[in-house]
Image: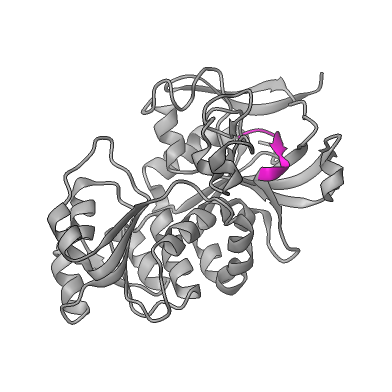
Amino acid sequence: MEKMKAIVLHEPNNFTYTEIDRPVIGDYDVLCRVESVSICGTDPKIIHGHFPGFWPQHFPIVLGHEWSGVITEVGAKSGYFGWEEGDRVCGIANVGCGYCKNCLEGRFTLCLNYGNEKVHKMYGHITNGAYAEYIAANIKSIARIPDDMDFNTAAVMDTFSIALHVVMRSGLEPGDTVLVNGAGAQGWFAILAAKTMGAGKIICAGSGHRLRMAQKLGAIPLDYRSEDVAARTLELTGGLGAKRVIETTGSAKGIRNACVAAARGGCISCVGFPNEDVPIPVKRLVMDEIDFVGNRGNPNTLEKAISVAHYVMDEINMLITHEFPLAEYAKALEVFENRLDHSLKVIVKPQWLK
């Protein structure tokens, strides 16, 4: 069996750059040569064991789910759907079973067979992912990328498509004022998604270099370390609050700020989640008819994100700050986790030789 290089997680806080068998594809899979992988904020949490028994369900495992590459082999039935060797593609993590009620309704990130590896996959979480020279990917999890999109940009389409889902779920209409709570990857991409959907004033709460990047992307910056986010949002909106709040922090304070800063009749669309549940002001949500919606993954938004990216390509490229060969993954992870050298999105290149 042919071999490949990969980053293998053997147990929490124990990963190695090593050689493993190249994956064998199924009928509805394609084998892809991985060109770029973007480090996701979830990756270090999995590495450090924050989701024991859930992500991953077993060891060893290859992580990585924000990726792009080129098809090198087509499964026995994948060709029936138009996939060919040489196609440039990018992928997402989730592959639902395709047969349960939620999957049939298009909500495959909520697959009722989630975690049953016989019928469900989640790359880089419970199924081997993309920190490797090759990945076997189900054709339901990939999309073609245009000729004018490079592999690094394509690798962050997973992140962008999640943000797009979150903004769409907020019910954003042209001219709506938006508060993006959190100046991380989901916050930046939410700003870009909201811009392309016609948002009016966009406010972003964060701090430091990441907040300055949010400002470059077009948001009014609020430093949550020195400003009262809810109070300042009310000031900036003439006392009305933000019609759409995109909550990405997953912190108790952030969620509370989101609930206070939202306008009457508005919506809080939440993608950040805390380690433990936090209290929210239900009385206010009820009396002011504020919707609070949760979001998981990127169901059916990958191709939409690729299309939308055409209008904000320069801004997306500003977010990609570092590249490393796969062999230097430990260094790439350190730069990402510790935000060294003003790092934002950090890319790993499996085809680069050390």
Task: Say whether residue 28 is left or right of residue 244.
Answer: right
Task: Provide residue 312's location: percent of width, then percent of height.
Answer: 55, 71
Q: Which residues are magenta?
A: 131-140
Q: Along the line of sight, which residue is nearer the eye, 47 or 307? A: 307
Question: Who's the residue at 42% across and 55% down the image?
Answer: 186
Question: Who's the residue at 18% across and 66% down the image?
Answer: 288
Quadrant where the C terminus is found in the figure: top right
Q: Residue furthest front?
A: 101
Q: Is residue 159 something that shows in the picture?
A: yes
Task: Say whether residue 148 is left or right of residue 189.
Answer: right
Here the colouring is one colour
Quadrant where the N terminus is found in the figure: top right
Task: Provide residue 102's location: percent of width, then percent of height.
Answer: 53, 42
Task: Say whether residue 232 is left or right of residue 321.
Answer: left
As drawn, 44 above or below 38: above
Question: Who's the residue at 59% across and 38% down the image?
Answer: 96
Q: Is residue 37 magenta?
A: no
Q: Is residue 136 magenta?
A: yes
Task: Say which quarter of the image contains residue 337.
Answer: top left
Q: Along the line of sight, which residue is nearer the eye, 303 or 45? A: 303
Task: Say which quarter of the image contains residue 201.
Answer: bottom left
Task: Provide residue 242's location: percent of width, then percent of height.
Answer: 26, 71
